Image: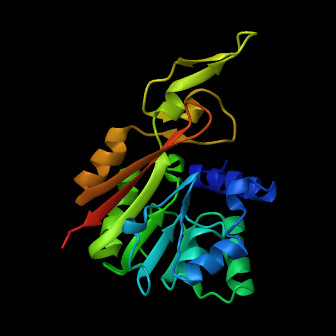
């Protein structure tokens, strides 16, 4: 029987093989824009605010669970020293392909975001973490590791689904349908079915409170509402030992 992370890896690999849109990678236009000093890191239909990543050139950046050929190549094209770290080999292949075709220097490492022991203390200036914490049981384990590997004044930019994603189920009523709040938080998918898909719904206390408890100072927050009313994502900017 697969453990949780083996199953998560298989699930993500399968999605990549099926051509999921979030593994499409950066376009040549996006990369060229980053090369000319106009870096835009997408956050669904928004982007990471410019002031959150200003001065990224020459900085050591960890794309945490951030493979897929998007963030890593864009940051490398913008002049950052990039390490991409991910559990999914097929997602990492996307970065390998783009790095080769675009002649970008990217360090690509396979691993579990709950264990960053191969990185020394204070070795990164930035960590960029796209939505992925819904695949780990305890976000604070990840936050502690991120705090450790960031240097003083280091920036941790994290995106995750709002708990509303997990509280409600869609109910078919023969008309327009509606959403009904049926789940308490925190949420674990296997409490409701034994399907292979594994996902955790964390509370805002686990996210924001966890960051604060690990020593981070949160100095940025934004949200992105998708077309589906329960599909709401948020992004935070947190700093280690602000200078």
Q: Position of residue 221 (x, y in %)?
A: 36, 51
For residue 88, side relative to residue 231 (left or right): right
Q: Residue at x 72, y 58 (%)?
A: 13
* Residue situated in front as seen by the camera: 29 or 228: 29
- The image position of residue 110, as x and y in percent, is 59, 72
**Residue for point 63% across, 22% down:** 170
Snapshot quadrant of residue 152: bottom left
**175 relative to 152, above or below:** above
Q: Residue at x 50, y 26 (%)?
A: 167
Q: Quick check: 142 above or below 63?
A: above
- The answer to which of 190 and 46 lies nearer the viewer is 46
Q: Quarter of the image containing the C terminus?
A: bottom left
Is 8 in front, or is 47? 47
184 sits left or right of 215 in the view:
right
Q: Quadrant of residue 100?
A: bottom right
The residue lying furthest to the top in this view is: 174
Query: Could you say where residue 7 lies in the image, as x and y percent from the top left?
Result: 65, 51
Residue visible at 53% across and 81% down in the picture: 78
Number of numbered discs on residues: 0
Residue 115 seen in render: no
Residue 41 in view of the camera: yes
């Amino acid at each position: 029987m697969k453990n949780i992370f083996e199953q998560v890896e298989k699930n993500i690999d399968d999605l990549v093989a099926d051509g999921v849109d979030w593994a499409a990678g950066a376009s040549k236009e996006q990369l060229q824009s980053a090369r000319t000093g106009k870096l835009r890191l997408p956050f669904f239909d928004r982007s990471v605010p410019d002031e959150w990543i200003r001065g990224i050139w020459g900085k050591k950046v960890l794309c945490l669970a951030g493979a897929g050929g998007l963030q890593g190549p864009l940051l490398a094209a913008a002049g950052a020293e990039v390490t991409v770290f991910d559990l999914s080999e097929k997602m990492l292949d996307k970065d390998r392909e783009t790095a080769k075709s675009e002649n970008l220097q990217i360090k690509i490492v396979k691993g579990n975001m709950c264990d960053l022991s191969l990185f020394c203390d204070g070795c990164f200036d930035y960590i960029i973490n796209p939505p992925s914490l819904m695949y780990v049981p305890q976000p604070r384990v990840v936050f502690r590791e991120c705090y450790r590997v960031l240097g003083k004044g280091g920036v941790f930019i994290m995106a995750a689904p709002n708990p509303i994603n997990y509280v409600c189920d869609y109910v078919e009523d023969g008309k327009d349908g509606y959403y009904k709040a049926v789940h308490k938080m925190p949420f674990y998918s296997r409490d409701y079915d034994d399907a292979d898909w594994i996902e955790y719904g964390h509370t805002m206390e686990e996210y924001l409170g966890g960051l604060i408890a690990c020593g981070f100072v949160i100095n940025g927050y934004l949200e992105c509402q998708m077309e589906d009313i329960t599909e709401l994502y948020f992004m935070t900017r947190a700093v280690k030992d602000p200078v």
